[in-house]
Amino acid sequence: MAISRTEVIRAKLERSGNEVHFLHVTQDQKVMICRTTNGAYADAVHPSPVLFVHLCVDGGGPITIATNFQKISEHIGPGAIGVFPPGARGTGRWPGMTAITFAIAVDAVVESFGKAWIDKLKSNVLSTIFRDPLVEATMMDMGHARPGVVSDAGLVHAAHMVTHQLLDQPSDIGMAPVGGVIPLGKATLDRLQTMLDGNLERQVSVTEMAEFAGVSRHHFSRRFKAATGRSPLQFAIMRRLAHAAELLEQEQTCNILSVAQRVGFDNPSHFARTFRQHFGVSPRRWKTEQMRTQSG
């Protein structure tokens, strides 16, 4: 007697220390959503031809996920979304964690997005544990819907949207490793620069930049430097100093203290010292030379 896909999924999840309750399953068993409650320890999650998307509802703890591309160690808690793409292995200690889990067959992903997206899932989605309001809301809706209320088409649509959100993260596929580290991709760097340019009046922390990029703090700093040759903080300071230089050039009536404050420096002496290190002249000298150039 053939074993159903649902039984295979249940066996894989239970092998990891989960209690599993299936909530909705499509007739072809390619898409299913279930509620899982973890035991004291979740052992290795074996490679599977299924994409697992876990939304932590309660509890949590440390987790390690690995593929052929990279290995990450993170902490998962309520609202966090953990992804186990096909071929991933993971271990974690999650006492009493409750999660809503999407199990999406690989062939369903291929049918929707093409085979190339599987590699994108493996390399890109695993860069961190995600927090995505749209994915969270969709999975919560599916997880709390009464049995029989969600149609096959509705469940497939929800799975399609969740997968699309994950795949829509800026991709770093094709980037050549630098010293064994995959650099951040151009799309990610462009988004970061736009974010930094919108927050020039303050010092954006590395943690905030990493969360914005969707990468763990440890991997973010290494991958950022591999892509730019500078640390994230050095790059952020350069953007603020470049804006300060523009203000000094464009606004003849502004004073040095005002410019320093507008680019996130509370201490004008620190601003002047940092400006000189970057441009080779003091802010006052820069302003004087720019005014002389404009009048000449």
Image: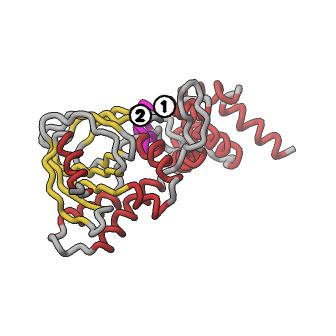
Residue 12, label in figure: none
Using residue 86 as the reference point, say whether residue 254 is left or right of it. right
Compared with 231, 10 (above or below) is below
Question: Where does residue 232 sit, x and y in percent of width and height?
Answer: 52, 33
Question: Where does residue 289 sit, x and y in percent of width and height?
Answer: 77, 36
Using residue 31 as the reference point, say whether residue 252 is left or right of it. right
Query: Magenta stretch?
Result: 205-220
Compared with 112, 120 (above or below) is above
The kind of residue on which mark 1 rests is Ser
Question: Where does residue 21 sit, x and y in percent of width and height?
Answer: 14, 56
Label 2 Cα neighbours within 10 Å, binned few <14 / some 14-19 / many ≥20: some
Q: Please say whether residue 258 is one of the residues in the magenta stretch.
A: no
Q: Residue at x 26, y 61 (%)?
A: 32
- Under tag 2, what secondary structure? helix
Q: Residue at x 55, y 43 (%)?
A: 172
CB under 8 Å between callouts 2 and 1?
Answer: yes
Q: Residue at x 50, y 35 (%)?
A: 265
Q: Please say whether residue 209 is one of the residues in the magenta stretch.
A: yes
Q: Which residue is mark 2?
A: 217
Quarter where residue 14 is shown = top left
Along the line of sight, which residue is nearer the eye, 62 or 217?
Answer: 62
- Residue 212 seen anywhere in this rendered image of the structure: no
Question: Where does residue 151 sit, x and y in percent of width and height?
Answer: 26, 75
- Under tag 1, what secondary structure? helix
Q: Residue at x 42, y 30 (%)?
A: 218
- Residue 295 seen anywhere in this rendered image of the structure: yes
Q: Which residue is mark 1?
A: 221
